[in-house]
């Protein structure tokens, strides 16, 4: 099945923004959009900054998919869709947020924007239960961090998911600068 033009455009533009903003390495992160009972999800190792139709897989809940091989996070994306009302999921590696995640179970933004938009951001420890725990965390939170790895945002659209990832990184960067300034 061919990917709808509007879906490909959103994946391409949001992926490009995440890459150009330095929120993923050239082959890091992944994106998905729900389409009825299927998902459009970036392929394993896809370059988010340069996505084309051949980089996006259509995946079904039973594990069936069209080429390319879907992201290694596909089960997690399905778990998030099953647990929340998300229409899209984005995963990136915002560096200040990842750096903060090593030493805490949640990140509470100190800046006004972050406090309004994010309130509290749960941090999930890596392990065998991480998929279920991230999905549970995303029931309430718009974005959650997998400790030492990256952020997962769920939203109605990819553009909203991009907003939560960028808002998180902005707040995490402010938190770091504040620490440095108060030394
Ligand atoms: Zn990752």
Image (cartoon, grey):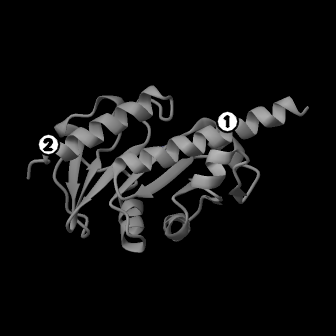
Mark 2 vs ligand 1: CB below 8 Å:
no
The residue lying toward the viewer, choosing from 32 and 176, is 176
User: What residue do we see at 40% from left, 68% from top?
Assistant: 79
Q: Give percent across and percent down for residue 99.
A: 68, 41
Look at the picture and state if 164 lies above or below 84: above
Q: Is residue 62 visible?
A: yes
User: What residue do we see at 26% from left, 68% from top?
Assistant: 61
Q: Give percent across and percent down for residue 46.
A: 32, 37
Mark 1 vs ligand 1: CB below 8 Å:
no
What numbered label is drawn on residue 173? Answer: 1
Q: CA distance from mark 2 to mark 1?
A: 35 Å
User: What residue do we see at 32% from left, 52% from top?
Assistant: 32
The residue carrying pointer 2 sits among few (fewer than 14), some (14 to 19) or many (20 or more) residues within 10 Å by Cα, namely few
Residue that numbered label 2 is attached to = 5
Q: Name the quarter where the C terminus is drawn.
A: top right
> Would residue 131 appear left or right of 183 to someone viewing this image?
left
Q: Is residue 48 visible?
A: no
Farthest residue to the left: give it: 1
The residue carrying pointer 1 sits among few (fewer than 14), some (14 to 19) or many (20 or more) residues within 10 Å by Cα, namely some
Could you say whether the residue bearing mark 1 is in a helix, strand or loop? helix
Look at the picture and state if 126 lies above or below 109: below
> Would residue 111 appear left or right of 89 to someone viewing this image?
right
> Would residue 174 appear left or right of 2 to someone viewing this image?
right
User: What residue do we see at 52% from left, 71% from top?
Assistant: 136
Q: Give percent across and percent down for residue 15.
A: 36, 37
Residue 55: image quadrant is top left
Q: Give percent across and percent down for residue 141.
A: 55, 63
N-terminal of the two: label 2 or label 1?
Answer: 2
């Amino acid at each position: 099945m061919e990917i709808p033009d509007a879906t490909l455009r959103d994946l391409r533009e949001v992926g490009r923004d995440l890459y150009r903003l330095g929120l993923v390495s050239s082959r890091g992160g992944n994106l998905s959009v729900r389409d009825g009972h299927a998902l459009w999800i970036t392929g394993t190792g896809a370059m988010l900054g340069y996505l084309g139709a051949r980089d996006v897989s259509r995946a079904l809940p039973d594990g069936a998919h069209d080429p390319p091989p879907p992201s290694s996070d596909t089960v997690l994306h399905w778990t998030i869709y099953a647990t929340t009302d998300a229409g899209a999921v984005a995963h990136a590696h915002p560096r200040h947020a990842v750096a903060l995640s090593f030493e805490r179970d949640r990140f509470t933004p100190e800046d006004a924007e972050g406090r309004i938009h994010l309130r509290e951001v749960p941090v999930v420890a890596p392990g065998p239960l991480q998929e279920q725990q991230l999905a549970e965390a995303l029931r309430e939170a718009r974005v959650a961090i997998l400790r030492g790895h990256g952020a997962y945002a769920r939203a109605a659209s990819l553009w909203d998911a991009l907003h939560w990832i960028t808002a998180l990184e902005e707040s995490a960067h402010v938190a770091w600068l504040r620490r440095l300034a108060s030394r």
